[in-house]
Amino acid sequence: MKVKFKYGIKTYSGLIDEMVYGSYRKDELCLGREFVYPTLTENNHALGSTMQNLASVYRNISPTYLQDLKKYALRNGQDNVPKDKVIPTAFSLFLKMMYAWLESDPEHVNLSAVTLADIVALDAPVRTIKRAVDAGFLHRVEVYADLTAGIQ
């Protein structure tokens, strides 16, 4: 939920009195939610394993690909995200792109074990941001033809 504070305080990030607050949009938007510790299930562990692998892949992508992903995130925030919503980060867009790739080819893609070498060997549409946009894995933005750096 959106939060408004008294006494001229615009935003706050952190945990106070069982509420978690986050500051977004260059300190113009504050969101709050109740802190709830989830009950862990087998599905949580499987998802955690997949996320750890994808985070490892993300840490090893080329710096030029990461620059392109950050440029895309900024352009996507300007073109597709309303002003009162949080702009997706480069990492969240990377995850969205990887899960869209999984949906497009579930027989060959295993996100809990995928590597950069697999992405290159399978000639995946996620090899460049431009190809991911063209494949429909990411929202189209006004300018994206320049986002052609390879993932490896």
Image: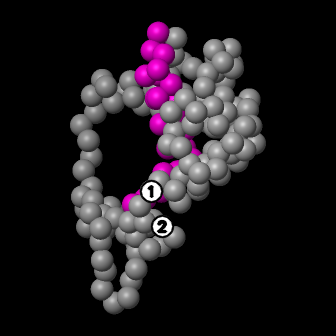
Residue 93 visible, this angle: no
Q: Residue at x 53, y 44 (%)?
A: 140
* CB within 8 Å, label 1 to label 2: no
Q: Which residue is most to the front?
A: 142
Q: How is the image coloured?
A: one colour
Observer-nearest of 137 and 34 = 137
Q: Which residues are magenta?
A: 85-107
Q: Amino acid at mark 2?
A: Arg
147 part of magenta stretch: no
Q: Amino acid at mark 1?
A: Val
Q: Which mark is residue 40?
A: none
Q: Which residue does the numbered mark 2 point to in the structure image?
A: 25
Residue 85 sits above or below residue 106 on the image: below
Observer-nearest of 94 and 123 = 123
Residue 82 visible, this angle: yes
Q: Badge 1: few (under 14), some or many (20 or more) residues near its Cα, within 10 Å?
A: few
Which is in the foreground here, disc 1 or disc 2?
Answer: 1
Q: Which residue does the numbered mark 1 point to in the structure image?
A: 81
